[in-house]
Image (cartoon, rainbow, N blue to C red):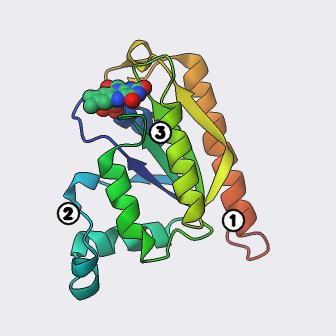
Amino acid sequence: MKILGLCGSLRSGSFNASVLRTAVDLTVAPRELVVWPDLGRLPFFNADVEETALPDVAAELRSAVGASDGLLIVSPEYAHGTSGVLKNALEWLVGGGEIAAKPVALVSASTAITGGDNARAWLSQTLTVMGARVIPQDLRIPQVVRKVADGRLTDEPTVAALRALLDDLADVAAEAHEGDGTFA
Ligand SMILES: Cc1cc2nc3c(=O)[nH]c(=O)nc-3n(C[C@H](O)[C@H](O)[C@H](O)COP(=O)(O)O)c2cc1C
């Protein structure tokens, strides 16, 4: 089972990237969590460019989403929504259709006590409109600065909640394959 991880922060010391790194650590075979390397490589979405010469990186992202069994999206909250970089990535994905029916789990980590609730709400609404299957379980990580060290989540209850979310996502992804013998 292949899960694709997307991080909405480009910051080198990103707390959200730390959460995603921890999710990779928690994922063991036969599950696989592959992190998309740097959404900042995508140019700003432009429908003219999409129509005439789809950038390789946008095509690669579409293929990676298409080849995955589910997505784990980890986002900061900026100005009461998700980050521009993540919204831009979703705009490139609209036209491809690969995200349709794809199980998606949402995580937001914020330095604020609100935990990035607005970012997840925005993402849930937009991904649902795009046809993705946003799972009802999600994870908010408030005051994240106290819960991360050396690029990994260290807060045990939060690590446990992340592990549970990965299990929930895997269950929904497996359900989607029920009967085709892909997953044990
Ligand atoms: C321009 C800017 C806007 C922000 N807006 C919000 C916000 O609306 N709500 C919130 O909870 N945190 C907000 N934050 C705090 C970020 O969520 C916090 O810096 C977070 O750690 C960023 O994610 P990262 O560590 O993965 O880069 C904002 C930060 C910046 C720099």
Q: CA distance from mark 2 to mark 3?
A: 22 Å
Q: Where does ligand 1 appear, by image quarter?
A: top left
Q: Is 42 left, or right, of 138 in this rendering?
A: left
Q: Mark 3: which secondary structure?
A: helix
Q: Name the amino acid type tagged 1.
A: Phe
Find the distance from the CA under tag 2 to the CA under tag 1.
Answer: 36 Å
Q: Which residue is mark 3?
A: 119
Q: Please report contact status of discs 2 and 3: CB closer than 8 Å, yes or no.
A: no
Instruction: Give the class, few, some or many, for how many residues have Cα within 10 Å of label 1's Cα (few <14, many ≥20).
Output: few
- Compared across the picture, whether 53 is left or right of 115 comes to left
Q: Which residue is mark 2?
A: 43
- Pick whichever, 144 or 18, lies toward us: 144
Say whether marks 3 and 1 touch (CB < 8 Å): no
Q: Quadrant of the N terminus?
A: bottom right
Q: Can you give x and y, in whole percent of width and height, for residue 72 in the image? A: 51, 49
* Residue type, mark 3 in image: Ala
Looking at the image, which is closer to me, 138 or 178?
Answer: 138
Instruction: Tell me where residue 152 appears, x and y as whole percent.
Output: 39, 26
Q: Residue at x 31, y 40 (%)?
A: 9
Which residue is located at x 57 percent, y 71 percent? 100
Outermost residue to the right: 179
Q: Which quarter of the figure has residue 90?
A: bottom left
Q: Position of residue 115 (x, y in %)?
A: 50, 25
Q: What quarter of the picture does the C terminus occupy? A: bottom right
Residue at numbered disc 1: 183
- Mark 3 and ligand 1: say if the CB distance to the nearest ligand atom is below 8 Å: yes
